[in-house]
Amino acid sequence: MPEAERRIIRYVLGELTSPELDEVEDRLLADQAFFEQVEAVEAEVCDDYVAGRLGAAERLAFTARLADSERLQRRVAFARGLAASAPQAARMAPWWWAAAAALIVATAGTVWFARDRTRPSGTIASGSVPGATIPPPVIATPAPGSGPPRVTPAPPAVLATITLFGPVVRDAREVPVLSIPAGEGPVRVEVALQEGDVFPAYRAEITSHAGASVFAADRLAPSTSASDSRRTVAIELAADRLPNGTYQVTVYGVRGADAVRLVTYGFRVNR
């Protein structure tokens, strides 16, 4: 086995030293082909782990890494489901399994930015919503003799919105920033859909730098901007779910039981 491939396997198993780990992660950010190679090897390791093909030392190392990674746990769960649903003789080849897994699993636990699909260039808008205020409560008019009026509290105003579109940024210094002002309320993360990305529903997930799931929303419907007809998928979550740090949001197109990963963007939160 070539040393380069063996090093990728050691990376997936969590066996690299700190200097080696830094070198691999830096290359993952800069080299698209290398990123895809690592993603494919990770899929094969998950498949071998489920099938019992890993050696004792490799299995022990991967089990330890698996305990700390929700993303890898999801990939292994998918591998188990695939193994259970297909006869042994009809099992997919490892390279095809990798492609399938990449479509439905968030793959960037230690990588900031996923595969960049060709998209029209654009700009990234982020920050507080200008003039955002909390609307007054709606007061219902009671019927005669029905007692005091009931007050329906208004939903809290969105504190900040970030809209992500155009080419995926790989340079950490150019990552778009979501600036969240002081206060309580939700923040809104919008991701533009590419023309042709038409599905009955969508799923979006925000993950942390360590690959932990921060927030996920299913059965999302797209909205269309009145100004430029851009279709976007948006999620709202409590601002306190996003402390200062770097995150990524991944959007999937959902059709029946199949989920297709469309794009992953990185962004940074400042308060």
Image: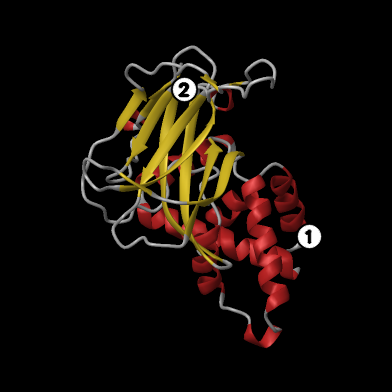
Is residue 14 visible to us here?
no
Q: Is residue 165 left or right of residue 59?
A: left
- Left or right of 101 on screen, residue 28: left
- Asked whether, in this view, residue 229 is left or right of residue 170, the answer is left
Measured Cα–Cα span from mark 2 to mark 1? 54 Å
Picture disc at residue 160:
none
Q: Amino acid at mark 1?
A: Ala
Q: Between disc 2 and disc 1, whose residue precedes?
A: 1
Query: In the rendered image of this protein, does residue 4 appear above or below residue 192?
Result: below
Residue 88, given in percent of the width and then of the height, sits at 70, 83
Check the picture and name the quadrant holding the N terminus. bottom right
The numbered mark at residue 157 is 2
- 87 or 14: nearer the viewer: 87
Q: Quadrant of residue 92?
A: bottom right
Find residue 27 and report its image quarter: top left
What percent of the width, then of the height, locates residue 39? 50, 57
Residue 151 place in picture, x, y as percent: 60, 19
SS under mark 1: helix
Residue type at numbered disc 2: Ala
| Residue neighbourhood size for the residue with mark 2, other residues' Cα within 10 Å, grouped as few (<14), some (14–19), many (≥20) | some
In the picture, the disc for residue 56 is 1
> Could you tell me which secondary element the residue under label 2 belongs to?
loop
Q: For the point 63% across and 62% down, which residue is it? A: 45
Q: Residues within 10 Å of mark 1 (few under 14, many from 20)?
A: few
